[in-house]
Amino acid sequence: THDTRLTMTRTRLPIPLYAAAAVICGLTAAPLVYVLLRASGADAALWGRLWTAQIPGLLANTVALVALTVALTVVLGVGVAWLVERTDLPGRGMFRWLLALPFAIPAYVAAVCWILVFRRGGLLDQWGGAAFGVAPGELPRPGIYGLSGAALVIGLCTFPYVYLPAAAALRSVNRTLEDAARMAGRGPWGAFRDVTLPAVAPAVAAGALLVALYALSDFGTVSMLRYRTFTAAIYGQFAGQVDRSGAAVLSVVLVALTVPLLAGESLLGNRRGPASSSWQPRRLAPLGRWRWPAFALVTLAALLSLGLPLAVLGGLTVQGIFFATEADRIWNVGSGGVWQYGLHSLLVAALAATAAVGLALLPTYLAVFYPRRVPRALLSIGKAAYALPGLIVGLGFVMLLSQWLPTLYGTVAALVIGFTFRLLPQALAAGEAALAGVPRACDQAARVMGCGPLEVLRRVTLPIAAPGVAASWALVFIGAMKELPTAVLLRPPGFDTLPVRIWAAASESVHTQAAPPAFLLILLTTLPLVVLSARGFGLNRVLSERSS
């Protein structure tokens, strides 16, 4: 019968496809496995020396950075989401776009801008001294180095991870519950605290976990702002010593810090979001006399997270092109050098994104359409590697390739491979969301007609899931364009990407020469988002995939 045939089709296990999926997901964990083996073989004296001399301080610094950054992003993200979605704030439609765009700005690029503006003798000193007649260095300015500066810069670049899911949750909360709370005597703040905030808490917590993972894995920002965390120490151990066991030991401790975050993310992933209602009153909370102060507050958040980097980088890029100095000429600013680094980044990012999305299709297809323990477990293994910092992935591939494939080490192919498996967990997560939107009836009908799994994937599933797959590719492409640690460790000589060029200039304290490649990087990472939005997929929906 039809039902029997459908049941047999659904229970047929394509073992060779499972084996291929196991290899794909297993390769994402290969760098971690190698680092663990390298650390386990380290001398006991090395472990003892690191535990007493470095690890306690690094642990305190890293935890403090994560806690302060998460607190900042939660307060800022939830606050602006409520103002934009639930009040009569002027320019609400404009802010929906502007507050999502900091997603495209790497934190290390924002760090360059803050250094250029607020360092001693920086732009603030120059402009402020000329405007107020203050001697250079005497104008009050915020401290940008250390814990506070690193948390502020990372928080301003990552608060969209909280803002986007919080805004989506606020749009879907059943507002009849809020009206009931108001009728029971709660004021606006009481209704928000007792009803709305608990309803959106799972979405906010999911975004906060992504922020915590970002802060744990950040390398460029903390290095530029002189705040010593595990990532900076790992790179110092790797670059400064012949024996890389010390880097492996510190990497193991950093990975251990991600375990609670992964457990929390898994727990939240199994929870449902807030219930939606077909009746959504269009009433907005009136801000009254606080309307324009709230507008000023949201505008300030947009200016600090988006306006300041674009203004600083754009101005210095124009200066470097039309009024080149000797330092600009040495660093190839204003010549074809920046475009060459841009082409390098585009080439590697496009190849890695295509490879990662292509490899992710098989595991995600099996997990979505053959939802059994084995494919779900394989997908979980592959997605768990998302918590691995890029520095550890790059370090693992350096050790693996230099020992087992020395002819491949130091080539562009090695860089593409490193990028592919660094971003494959992200492709798995986004691909799963894309395939989950394909109606099951279409897949089942094709299988009843005798099509095999690969033919169903090619002829039915992929055409229907094309918009989601395109969004997945765009997100992975953006991640590859911004990736710094893997590029620093695996790039071949003479093949610099835009992030590497930014980092090289900043590490030499010639921050003005980091501006042109940083500005080009922002333009190239924003373009895919604009194209997808113009195609009707929606910028907020594209970016929210990252926080789902």
Image (cartoon, rainbow, N blue to C red):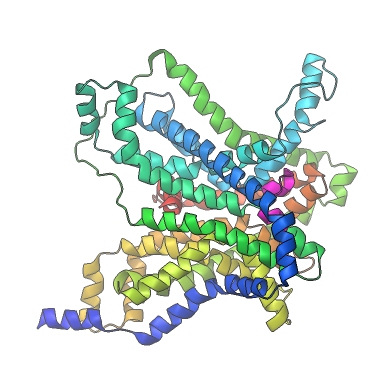
325 vs 414, left or right, is right
Q: Residue at the spot x=46%, y=33% of the render? A: 95
Residue 248: % across, % down: 68, 67
Residue 18: % across, % down: 39, 81
Name the residue at the bottom extreme: 16
Q: Residue at the spot x=22%, y=33% of the render? A: 177
Q: Which residues are magenta?
A: 220-234
Res 263 seen here: yes
Q: Note whether 327 is above or below 392 in the view shown.
A: above
Name the residue at the top extreme: 289
514 vs 382, left or right, is right
Q: Note whether 217 is above or below 347 in the view shown.
A: above
- The quadrant holding residue 188 is top left
- The quadrant holding residue 380 is bottom left
Per the image, is 423 magenta?
no
Q: Main secondary structure of the magenta part?
A: helix
